[in-house]
Amino acid sequence: MIDLQPGGSRIGRPRSPHNLVSGGESRYHLTGPGGEQPGGYWHITKVEEPTRFVVPDGFTDDAGNPVPGDPVVMEVKLDEEPGTTRMTLTSTFASAEQLDEMEDGNGGRPGRRARADRRNPGPAA
C-alpha cells in the first residue's frame, strides 16, 4: 500500500491488474482513515515508456462501474535522478468546482499542491 498522507487515505491493491498500455485500464480502491473504500478506475490513454503515462482517473460504484461525471486527467512522469526516481503527478480538473469538490473531500488539504517524493536510500553502507 502507498500512504497518501499521515493518518489519511491509502491506495489499496488494484482490483484488476494494472494494464499500462494505451487502451488498457485498471480498477483500484482507496482506504480512508475510517476504513471506507471508494473505488476508482484508470483508462490508459497515453504511454511513453518508461517515463510517462496519462490516464482519466475516476470513481466507480460498488459494482466497479465508472460513475457518471468528468474524471480527473492525471499525468504521471518518472524522472531519474542520482540514486532515486522522482514521480510527478499532475492532475487536470474539468472545472474549478471539480477541484473544490476534490479538496473538500480531501479534508480541505490543497490537493493541487500535494507532492510526494520517495527516496531510494541506495545500498547500505
Image (cartoon, rainbow, N blue to C red):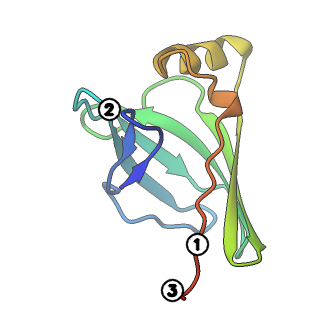
**Residue labelled with disc 1:** 120
- Quadrant location of the N terminus? bottom left
- Residue 92 position within the rendered picture, expressed as x and y whole percent measured from the top left: 73, 34
Res 50 label: none
Q: SS class of the residue under badge 1?
A: loop
Residue 8 vs residue 123, the one in the foreground: 123
- Residue nearer the viewer, 116 or 111: 116
Is 76 left, or right, of 120 in this rendering? right
Q: Are marks 2 and 1 in contact (CB under 8 Å)?
A: no
Q: Residue at x 24, y 26 (%)?
A: 34
Tell me whether the residue at label 3 lies in contact with that at label 2, contact meaning CB atoms closer than 8 angstroms. Answer: no
Q: Residues within 10 Å of mark 1 (few under 14, many from 20)?
A: few
Question: Of discs 3 and 2, which sits in the foreground?
Answer: 3
Q: Nearer the viewer, mark 2 or mark 1?
A: 1
Quarter residue 94 falls in: top right
Cα distance between the residues tagged 3 and 2? 34 Å
Q: Residues within 10 Å of mark 2 (few under 14, many from 20)?
A: some
Q: Residue 15's x, y, as percent?
A: 30, 54
Q: CA distance from mark 1 to mark 3?
A: 11 Å
Q: Is residue 56 visible?
A: yes
Q: Which mark is residue 124?
A: 3
Q: Earlier in the sequence, mark 3 or mark 2?
A: 2
Find disc 2 in the rendering and name its residue: 32
Q: Residue 104 location, x and y as percent?
A: 52, 13
The answer to whether residue 68 is left or right of residue 33 is right
Under mark 3, the amino acid is Ala
Q: Residue at x 58, y 32 (%)?
A: 71
Front one among 121 and 39: 121
Mark 3: secondary structure: loop
Please name the amino acid that badge 2 sits on.
Gly
**Three-letter amino acid code of the residue under disc 1:** Asn
In this rendering, the label closer to the viewer, 1 or 3: 3
